[in-house]
Amino acid sequence: MKTLTKEHGPLLAIGGAGSGNYVVDAGHGWRRITGSTRAFISETYFDLAGMSQREKTMFIEGAAVQEVAPAFLTAGAAGDGYLMADIMTSEPLTEQEALNLATQGNFGFVQCGLGYQETIYARIEIWAKDLDTATWPYALKLSSNQLGSLEPTASDRIYSYRVVNIDGNSAATRFAFSGVRHIISAVAKEEPDFQYLMRLRRSYELAQNHDED
């Protein structure tokens, strides 16, 4: 079994004070999502080219997320909050598709570019400050939900995304998010030729459809 890791750096978003507008003040690989005033994305990928060249399929045994702490809010107030999504997929996403998946899921009616099978793992959390913690710099976790299939893949990449969507009514002037590590445990195995070729064809077709969009 192989353990694969990819990291997303910290993010400092400033602005707010009830304006609903935040920008990246400091961030390793982060950018604001086009058309949004408060959503941000970081993206990278696990390189599986060595496995695909040897015509092996990656069977995913598990996926996880490691992080240090929730976001640190400056000048925050009760009601301030954010959505945080950690996403790993066998097919690439546009930034809008990643935001749609983070906020609406990977169901058939959602325009997120993929479905259950291509979503290897996704963890979506909602954090907010309440009256009891209004003077504390950290929010409380209100919910944590998971999606994904852990389906095998013949793709030469597994795509890794982290999406932040800050609540537009937040009073905080700074949201400081720590770095995070995405982890996948997988086994590379040979499949019968027909199964491997069908899986490879599926990966290719989805990648081509994404390029055409």
Image (tube, rainbow, N blue to C red):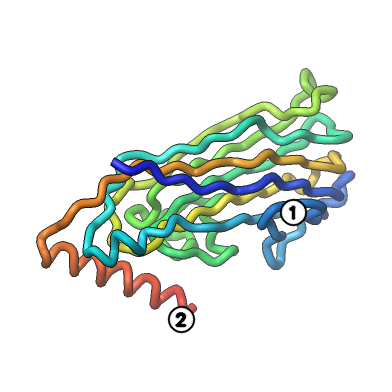
- Tell me which numbered mark, 2 or 1, is placed earlier along the sequence: 1
Q: Is residue 198 left or right of residue 206?
A: left
State the residue at coordinates (85%, 35%). Answer: 74
- Label 2 – label 1 distance at C-alpha: 28 Å
Q: Is residue 76 above or below residue 101?
A: above
Q: Residue 203: where, in percent of width, then height? A: 32, 67
Q: Which residue is mark 1?
A: 38
Q: Residue 118: where, in percent of width, then height? A: 36, 57
Q: Which residue is mark 2?
A: 212
Q: Residue 139: where, in percent of width, then height? A: 72, 29
User: Quarter-wise, where is residue 84 in the image?
Assistant: top right
Image quadrant containing the N terminus: top left
210 or 63: nearer the viewer? 63
Q: Is residue 116 above or below residue 53?
A: above
Q: Is residue 39 left or right of residue 156?
A: right
> Which residue is at the far bottom?
212
Q: Amino acid at mark 1?
A: Arg
> Which residue is at the far top?
132
